[in-house]
Amino acid sequence: MPISPLHEPVLGWYAANARELPWRAPSASPWAVLVSEVMLQQTPVARVLPVYLEWVRRWPAPADLAACAPGAAVRVWGRLGYPRRALRLHEAATAIVERHDGRVPSSYDDLLALPGVGAYTAAAVASFAFRSRHAVLDTNVRRVLARTVSGRAQPPSSLGSAERRDAEELLPDDPEVAATWAVAVMELGALVCTARAPRCADCPVATLCRWRASGQPDWDGPPPRVQRFAGTDRQVRGLLMAVLREAHGPVPGDRLVAVWSDGDQRRRALDGLVSDGLVEPLAANEFQLPGG
């Protein structure tokens, strides 16, 4: 493909401005990269960092995690949110041990076949850990490309084939450069081309941005959904999980009753946690994290 005028300024900006994050270090293993990518889904870096560091300290390789009970993963996950991700990482670690001799696979297809690994995560790990040529399309990347290439304030609500094709066509030919490009565009979206207050004066491709050139038109699609938290089943689930994590053993049902006064909602939240495999019901109305 012809060299895009976006490549040089974005790559140069990244070389000068990239954050030093542990999963980007040359010493970071493919397992560390996979852990970081799962943790970073819908979760900011500041919240991920302490949990990530504790996780890779305890379980520096997939076999270390696979040898533990799933509940240990949920406990270390703490208040990071969406704790099913902890179970998926445990399942992925077990699959890596069983299918790949304990080594994170390098191919996109093998990564995609791991439990809990979707198209984005497979592309990210293949690119960042193994320096392969893949379009890594998270929210930040999609927003940067929507503005600079398509002239739109935001990308469409769902990722379509045309958007993926355009991103793939923009990839540098050299796999190593393509891998750096992928993380560079992601960093540009996280730090400069942000959703609500883009810092166009600091953008290395401001003069090439079609959205800026057209006067930064407002997003003409449906407004983003604002997720309410207070009073939702998600809040109740989090409160129940906090009690179970801190107990380090079976918890009598009476202790969970004190968490939330609405009995119907509390039971619904607890049933959902059991159904998701995050909580194990025991005899005599006791509950614990999976595997104790």
Image (spheres, rainbow, N blue to C red):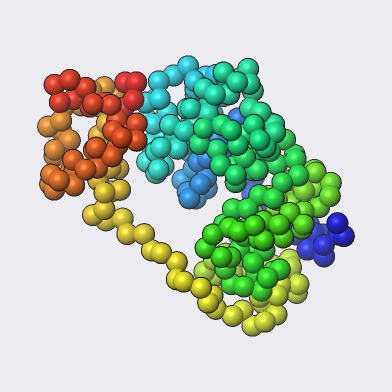
Please give left or right for residue 168 compared with residue 144 in the image.
right
The foreground one among 192 and 161 is 161
How many labels sit on residues? 0
- Camera sees residue 189: no
In which quadrant of the rendered view does residue 285 lie? top left
- Camera sees residue 212: yes
Residue 269, position in %: x, y? 24, 42
- Looking at the image, is 254 positioned above or below residue 96? below
Q: Residue at x 17, y 35 (%)?
A: 256
In which quadrant of the rendered view does residue 212 lie? bottom right
- Looking at the image, is 205 positioned above or below residue 66? below
- Looking at the image, is 199 positioned above or below residue 130? below
Q: Residue at x 64, y 83 (%)?
A: 215
Residue 282, position in %: x, y? 21, 22
Q: Residue at x 64, y 31 (%)?
A: 110
Tell me the quadrant of the picture where the C terminus can be found.
Answer: top left
Outermost residue, right side: 2
Please give left or right for residue 210 compared with residue 283 in the image.
right
Please give left or right for residue 90 compared with residue 170 in the image.
left
Residue 286, position in %: x, y? 18, 25
Q: Residue at x 72, y 35 (%)?
A: 130
